[in-house]
Image (cartoon, rainbow, N blue to C red):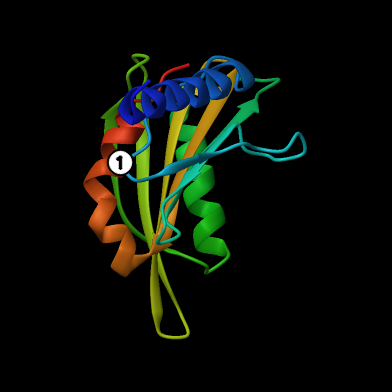
Amino acid sequence: MTRLALSLLTRLGLVLCVFMAAGCLSIEPPPDFVEREEYDWSSYAYRALNADAVVLGVREIHEDKEASLGFWTKAVKNRLQASHAYAILGEETLKVASGETATLIRMGREDAGVQYDYWVALVDAGSTLYVIEAGGRREHFSKVEGALRTSIKSFSH
């Protein structure tokens, strides 16, 4: 078997493992990102990162009482602004592969002279809220911003 075929089979196996372990959620990571297997105790259903420590993750929040996407967007923004951890840099609406509308909140912060970017995309799927997060040092994050946006749009469940 060629190296390319072996590489493709390995990647397919990883995707299938994530697909099965995460209750059929799927997201295509940016090129050069490595998918990580999450521990049972982890709050993430999916995680991937690149060599520059830019991370992509997905959390599933199961709701007892459904709330609107507008509610969750406002709650996340209020929480992050109240903590003074991040400044909101922008907000946009995206359509994800599973058909839902997602709200992408772009944030930034500075710590000891180092700038960081952090994105939160919220996907309301009825009784489950999917929280897609991406973050890292701005100098590295900016290089993969477009690929991260594409990954978020590739999300399905």
Residue 19 drawn at (x, y percent): 53, 18
Q: Residue at x 24, y 57 (%)?
A: 143
- Answer with the quarter of the image where residue 29 lies: top left
Q: Which residue is mark 1?
A: 31
Q: Is residue 45 shown left or right of residue 121?
A: right
Nearer to me, 35 or 101: 35
| Crowdedness near tag 1: few (<14), some (14–19) or many (≥20) residues, C-alpha within 10 Å | few
Quarter of the figure that contains the N terminus? top left
Residue 13 drawn at (x, y percent): 50, 21
Q: Residue at x 30, y 41 (%)?
A: 31
Tag 1's secondary structure? loop
Residue 101 drawn at (x, y percent): 34, 23
Q: Residue at x 33, y 14 (%)?
A: 99
Q: Residue at x 31, y 28 (%)?
A: 4
Amino acid bearing label 1: Pro
Nearer to me, 16 or 75: 16
* Residue 45 in sight in this render: yes
User: What is the total number of numbered labels drawn onto the structure image?
Assistant: 1
Nearer to me, 116 or 74: 116
In this view, the residue farthest toward the bottom is: 112
> Does residue 134 lie above or below 3 as drawn?
below
* Residue 27 in sight in this render: no
Q: Is residue 71 shown left or right of residue 92?
A: right
> Does residue 76 lie above or below 99 as drawn?
below
> Does residue 22 lie above or below 99 as drawn?
below
